[in-house]
Image (cartoon, rainbow, N blue to C red):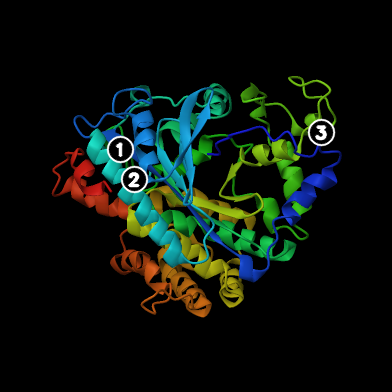
Amino acid sequence: MTTKTVSDSNSPVVESRDQLIASFAGGEKPRERWRIGTEHEKFVYSRDDHHAPSWDEAGGIRALLIELQQHGWKPVEEGGNLIALTGADGSVSLEPAGQFELSGAPLENLHQTCAETGRHLDQVKAAGEKLGIGFLGLGMWPDKTRAELPIMPKGRYGIMLRHMPRVGSMGLDMMLRTCTIQVNLDYASEADMAQKFRVGLALQPLATALFANSPFTEGKPNGYLSYRSHIWSDTDPARTGMLPFVFEDGFGYERYTDYMLDVPMYFVYRNGQYIDAAGLSFRDFLTGELSVLPGERPTLDDWTDHLSTAFPEVRLKTFLEMRGADGGPWNRICALPAFWVGLLYDQGALDAAWSLVKHWTIDERQALRDAVPKLGLDAPVPGRGTLRDIAGEVLDIANAGLAARARLNSSGDNETGFLDPLREIVRTGKVPAEQLLDRYHGAWGGDLSRVYAEQSF
């Protein structure tokens, strides 16, 4: 989640809804300036007893942030607490229970973003060796209750932790017990954004299936392949979901603006402090009628903050975020951006992907989304059997898109090799969660502690 560092006192005051709409147009970039931003989270645990370390304990999360500064990372504090790092490779931040996230820099190709991931993992593993901590690549804590998890000292998390139980039964699980991989991608125009948004939403269930990696809860199988994805089904319906309006004629920046104006607020950030505005209306803020800041109108910086508090399967800021994948190992961190760059950054591939999904109805898309957490690749696809039946075709489209980009590394290889882990999943027919369940019921003999040895970075 976003880490605030300063209040932007120079941010323009929003005088009209048109400024909010224009903020999305401000994200448009010509193709040659399109970049790839990869985000990935991992669980941190003590090697001695597998507990999740607190922020301030010896060898805990703060110590990890301090240790990483020897690699050139600069500290970010909130209220005197070290809560993030910034550097050439983007930023390192903390999720609510200490999940450790790299939000990578905007990079030109997948070779660069995978190298960035490798550098980060090398750094955290070296720090972990000194501190006696390890890092687990899964979509959900396999064995921790909420009560066993620490809370990081970030102001927005306190507001969210209070608010989540009011609006859903699993919001606290989302905050405390899940990890994801995401990729952020650019668009050239309003029409380009809309097409990418539609393809991203329609095929997000396939990404969820291919990356499904959260089959355990509190020490035993939970009946799902991506329990992380299931959690989003009852987190907060006002700010999650498949956004049917994206597929309506005329969808664009204005319609997404209206959606965001109706998403209830969480907070306003002023003078280094988070002011609790949970459940209040940004529309009231626009007219100076926000009860916690009477008479004050929002700035564009406030709008940017508010955009970060919606959690649909695809999210629009001044770029598009693909949000459907569980956390996982290094090769799948590289595979997720490859999947989406291949589909969305070449027009021929984008058109082919849209042709595959454009006839699906609202109800069919929602049914697919609802089925995927339990069924994975066996989730039924409208008129086409199951996701298993189209997965290879979609990967072929992504492969063609990456080949057309022709972004080569120093050895002359293009970017298509980053799809290999996904091709292997389709070849074997088993998503990562199914492979874990096979081990749990087989070689592990029901001993879930084995997951730490086999799924750590």
Q: Position of residue 446 (x, y in %)?
A: 17, 40
* Residue where numbered disc 2 is placed: 138
Category of crowding for the residue at label 3, using alpha-carbon neighbours closer than 10 angstroms: few (below 14), some (14–19), many (at least 20): many
Give the amino acid at mark 3.
Answer: Leu
- Separation of residues labelled 3 and 1 (CA atoms): 43 Å
Query: Residue 282 occupies which quadrant of the picture?
Result: top right
Q: Secondary structure at mark 2?
A: loop
- Separation of residues labelled 3 and 2 (CA atoms): 41 Å
* Residue where numbered disc 3 is placed: 286
**Badge nearest the viewer, 1 or 2:** 2
Whichever of callouts 3 and 2 sits on the residue coming sooner in the sequence is 2
Whichever of callouts 3 and 1 sits on the residue coming sooner in the sequence is 1
Give the amino acid at mark 1.
Answer: Pro
Query: Residue 307 occupies which quadrant of the picture?
Result: top right
Residue 58's place in the image compared with 367, above or below, is: above
Any mark on residue 142, and which?
Answer: 1
Q: In the rendered view, does 294 fall on the left or right side of 386?
A: right
**Badge nearest the viewer, 3 or 1:** 3
Residue 302's place in the image compared with 212, above or below, is: above
Q: Position of residue 172 (x, y in %)?
A: 47, 29
**Badge nearest the viewer, 3 or 2:** 3
Give the amino acid at mark 2.
Answer: Leu
Going 53% across and 63% down the picture, which residue do you hit? Answer: 382
